[in-house]
Image: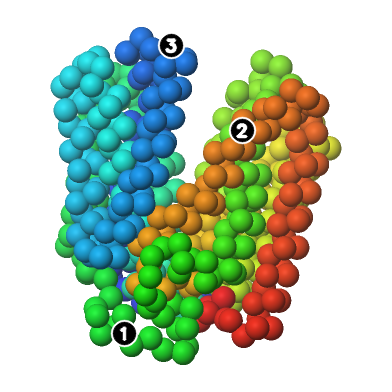
């Protein structure tokens, strides 16, 4: 059975395997950001407010970078922009290794996030360009798996370097960026569609056919994609409670043990992603992506909703396993759905704006629920999250039915 599941990764384009290796290396080398708060407060002496401001600027810098990168990817070329943007992101980290506690360092980190934002939509566009049909789900799941394999190792290395050799923290992040780019340069082709491909367009690829116009008018002609993104925004809002409300719940239930238990659940989350991504995608590879995300919403409803009722660590572990399976299905199938509803002429731009829309749920989740917890209690977060998840599940099911009845089916959705 394992051979059957891993068999779905056979026969993918060579460039997908290169991106898989690049994902692993990049995630292992994501050394600076996890310890950015510690760097700003412990090494530069910033107070929590100043540190929070710089982290906010770093997050915001990603947005214009993503929009610019997406536009350039559609007009200049996917591979060129990916190499240029990721290369500049790596270069920004090198001076940080030699500037010590200079106030210039945080601004270079912000620049790194800007260029990293520019690289992200080109990465997604290349994956969509090189795949189609069932192959697309396998490709996106492989890249998701690669990221999580690398990220399971990276923070441990980062913690050691932060403590013992801060310059190597920055140089290591830069070096792994360039190594990852080596795989892209050597093995990933330029995938930007030619003028002939843009002009061709076929009925079987109707949702991916080239279109003329700016981002907004073309996006507005895709109401299904807009609706899907808004329902996905609700799910990222729910998922954000893993990093915000769940630690508060554990601290309330298990005084003095909350952080330890939360660390254990983070480990469970990472292990489930690594070991269950392939089986889950193998089992659901024939399921339409929109329905797979609906199942993810149902798993969120059960996994997060049960926190309202439980009070022992083993049950919290079970809860984490359940909602992490939802995370896997949502993360992989969301990319597939977007790719199958995006015109080939606008893949870069769509992959810049849609993740921002969907990711808004994750951004607003903590502040909104922080106010909610002040008014009520952290325990009442979980019935609300279950309700939002069930609503999203039902809405995605209705979206699938409407889309099917109107005959607006993409090649694999």
Mark number displayed over residue 47: 3
CA distance separating discs 1 and 2: 45 Å
Residue 178 horizontal/vertical position (percent): 19, 46
Mark number displayed over residue 366: 2
Residue 170, quarter of picture:
top left
Residue 96, quarter of picture:
top left
Vertical arrangement, residue 362 with respect to residue 347, above or below:
above
Vertical arrangement, residue 79 with respect to residue 55, above or below:
below
Residue 56 horizontal/vertical position (percent): 44, 30
CA distance separating discs 3 and 2: 21 Å
Of the two numbered discs 1 and 3 in the rendering, the one whose residue sits closer to the viewer: 1
Residue 341 is at least partly visible in this image = yes
- Assign a secondary structure to mark 2: helix
- Work out which quarter of the rendered image holds the C terminus and state it: bottom right
Check disc 2: other Cα within 10 Å, few if <14, some if 14-19, many if 20+: some
Vertical arrangement, residue 372 with respect to residue 48, above or below:
below
Q: Which residue corresponds to mark 1?
A: 199
The residue that appears at 28% across and 27% down in the rendered structure is: 107
The residue that appears at 42% across and 67% down in the rendered structure is: 139
Check disc 3: other Cα within 10 Å, few if <14, some if 14-19, many if 20+: few
CA distance separating discs 1 and 3: 56 Å
Earlier sequence position, callout 1 versus callout 3: 3
Q: Is residue 33 left or right of residue 288?
A: left
């Amino acid at each position: 059975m394992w051979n059957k599941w891993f068999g779905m990764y056979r026969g993918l384009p060579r460039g997908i395997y290169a991106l898989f290796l690049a994902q692993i290396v990049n995630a292992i080398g994501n050394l600076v950001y996890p310890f950015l708060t510690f760097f700003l407060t412990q090494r530069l002496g910033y107070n929590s407010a100043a540190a929070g401001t710089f982290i906010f600027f770093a997050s915001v810098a990603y947005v214009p970078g993503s929009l610019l990168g997406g536009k350039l990817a559609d007009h200049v070329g996917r591979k060129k922009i990916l190499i240029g943007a990721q290369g500049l992101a790596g270069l920004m980290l090198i001076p940080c290794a030699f500037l010590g506690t200079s106030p210039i360092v945080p601004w270079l980190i912000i620049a790194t996030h800007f260029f990293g934002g520019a690289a992200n939509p080109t990465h997604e566009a290349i994956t969509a360009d090189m795949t189609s049909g069932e192959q697309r789900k396998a490709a996106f799941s492989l890249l998701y798996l690669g990221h999580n394999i690398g990220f399971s190792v990276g923070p441990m290395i980062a913690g050691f370097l932060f403590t013992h050799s801060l310059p190597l923290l920055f140089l290591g992040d830069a070096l792994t960026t360039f190594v990852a780019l080596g795989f892209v340069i050597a093995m990933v082709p330029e995938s930007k569609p030619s003028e002939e491909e843009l002009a061709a367009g076929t009925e079987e690829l109707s949702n991916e056919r080239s279109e003329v116009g700016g981002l907004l008018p073309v996006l507005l002609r895709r109401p299904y994609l807009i609706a899907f993104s808004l329902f996905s925004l609700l799910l990222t809002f729910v998922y954000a409670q893993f990093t915000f409300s769940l630690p508060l719940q554990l601290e309330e239930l298990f005084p003095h043990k909350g952080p330890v238990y939360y660390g254990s659940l983070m480990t469970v989350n990472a292990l489930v992603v690594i070991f269950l991504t392939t089986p889950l995608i193998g089992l659901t590879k024939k399921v339409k992506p929109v329905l797979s995300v609906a199942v993810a919403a149902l798993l969120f409803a059960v996994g997060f909703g049960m926190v309202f009722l439980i009070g022992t660590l083993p049950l919290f572990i079970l809860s984490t396993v359940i909602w992490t399976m939802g995370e896997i299905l949502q993360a992989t199938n969301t990319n597939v759905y977007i790719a199958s509803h995006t015109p080939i002429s606008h893949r870069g731009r769509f992959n810049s704006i849609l993740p921002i829309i969907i990711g808004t749920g994750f951004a607003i989740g903590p502040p909104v629920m922080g106010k909610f917890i002040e008014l009520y209690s952290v325990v009442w977060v979980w019935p609300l999250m279950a309700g939002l998840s069930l609503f999203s599940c039902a809405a995605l099911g209705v979206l699938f039915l409407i889309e099917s009845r109107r005959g607006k089916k993409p090649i694999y959705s």
